[in-house]
Amino acid sequence: MKSLGLSLSYFLPALYFCTVLLYFLIFFRKKKHLEYLTTYFLGVLLAVHVANMTIRWFALHVVPVSTVFDAMSFLAFAILVVYFIIELSIKNKASGFYIMTFAFVAEVTSAINYNWEPETNELLTNTPFAIHASLNIVGYTALSLSAIYALLYIIQNRNMKLRRFNVIYDQLPALTYLEMMSIRSVLIGIVLTGCGLMLGHYQTHQVFGKFWLSDPKVIVTDLAWLFYLLGYLGARLFRWRGRWMAYLSLSGFTVLLLGGVIVVFFAESFHEFF
């Protein structure tokens, strides 16, 4: 099992690279006839990554976020999952090269520092906690991608107003697709992060006897999620579109990011594992 796990861990970066190369050929070398292959490449990549994490879990009881470099690999997986959902639902592949490049870099960084060590932290071998952490990471990744799509929307919109039809303008998706991608990413992030937070509060109740603790990280995360939820519901209710949604997505991500930085550097939390 160890040899299979090691083989998959070094095979994954090659698969990510091949996927990035495929998108590069499609959009920078105009090989449009290869577009039908992206779904198959992403599907195989997803299956191999799941197999790798499953093997490590059964062999070592290692949660995907037990170390920084394990977390990098799971970040690549999270990007892959969110982007795969977006591409399948919106039927637009124009951002694939940029998004999958992020995933490739994260996976390579993880593979270089790969290790086969059993987990010693009892919390990190707990299955409910693994699900809680995994849902939150995939949710945060979706919110991050939403911010990236929102930023690209603002750039593309500005290029159109200034009639600046350069290389970047040609390679980016149309405004309509960027808006749809950002909104879809926000929705995925709200749902998955919400499930992860609810599971976390349930575990808190099981361990500490109450659903909410005055922990800075919990408070910041809950408030950021609530900000996203209210913003999304407000956008649906008042039909905010275009730039308004882009700025809303960027604002939400800024709140989440700044809150995380404040907690990391200025507050103590029981969420510290390594």
Image: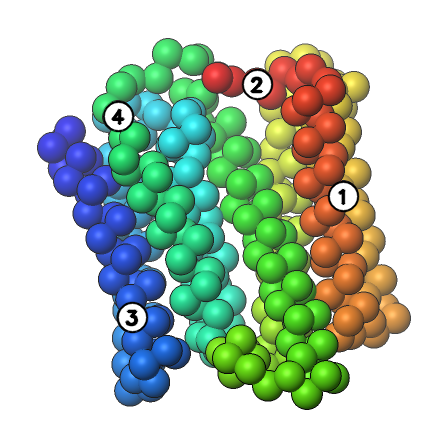
Element class at badge 1: helix
Mark identifier at residue 255: 1
Query: First in sequence: mark 1 or mark 3?
Result: 3
Residue ID at (49%, 38%) = 134
Query: First in sequence: mark 1 or mark 2?
Result: 1
Residue 205 falls left or right of residue 233? left
Q: Residues within 10 Å of mark 2 (few under 14, many from 20)?
A: few
Q: Nearer the viewer, residue 215 or 97?
A: 97
Would you place residue 31 above or below residue 194 in this image?
below
Q: How many marks?
A: 4
**Residue found farthest to the left:** 3
Residue ID at (77%, 71%) = 243
Give the Cα separation between the discs numbered 1 and 3: 35 Å
Query: First in sequence: mark 1 or mark 4?
Result: 4
Question: Mark 2 sits on what residue?
Answer: 272
Residue 220, how many percent across, how many down? 75, 32
Give the Cα separation between the discs numbered 3 and 4: 29 Å
Mark identifier at residue 22: 3
Residue 39, how many percent across, how many down? 34, 70
Residue 223, how many percent across, how many down? 79, 38
Residue 148, how many percent across, how many down? 60, 59
Element class at badge 3: helix
- Under mark 2, the amino acid is Glu
Looking at the rendering, which quadrant does residue 46 occupy? bottom left
Looking at the rendering, which quadrant does residue 178 occupy? bottom right
Give the Cα separation between the discs numbered 4 and 2: 21 Å
- Under mark 3, the amino acid is Leu
Mark identifier at residue 233: none
- Under mark 4, the amino acid is Asn
Mark identifier at residue 115: 4
